[in-house]
Image (cartoon, rainbow, N blue to C red):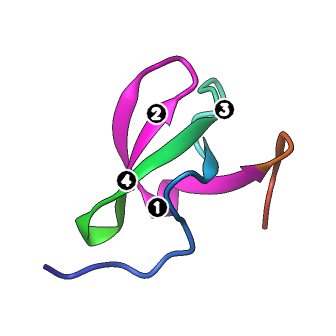
Amino acid sequence: MPTSKHDFAEGDRVRAQRRPEFPDGTVLRLMDLGYLLVRWDSDVLETAHHSELTKVANGAPQK
């Protein structure tokens, strides 16, 4: 299957760019087509596209 290029890895801390009310989360698995399985800190599991996420370090988004 085709895959998308991104800089995310399993274990990365992430934030949903367009959903500021969402808690931060952790990437659990890299999936096909640029999707990631994320466990949000509220214990919700969700697939999210890498283009919708930003990495977080020490509570601040990384660029």
Q: Which residues are magenta?
A: 37-56
Q: Which residue is mark 3?
A: 20
Disc 4, SS: strand
SS for tag 1? helix
Mark 1 = which residue? 50
State whether residue 26 is above or below residue 36: above
Q: Earlier in the sequence, mark 2 or mark 4?
A: 4
Question: 10 Å neighbourhood of mark 1: few (<14), some, or many (≥20)?
Answer: many
Distance in Å between CA atoms under marks 4 and 3: 22 Å
Report the residue that reaches farthest toward the left. 1
Along the polypeptide, which appears first: circle 2 or circle 1? 2
Of the image marks 3 and 2, the number of the one nearer the N terminus: 3
Q: Amino acid at mark 3?
A: Pro
Rendered residue at 55%/41% (across/down):
26
Residue type for callout 4:
Arg
Mark 2 near mark 1, Cβ–Cβ under 8 Å?
no
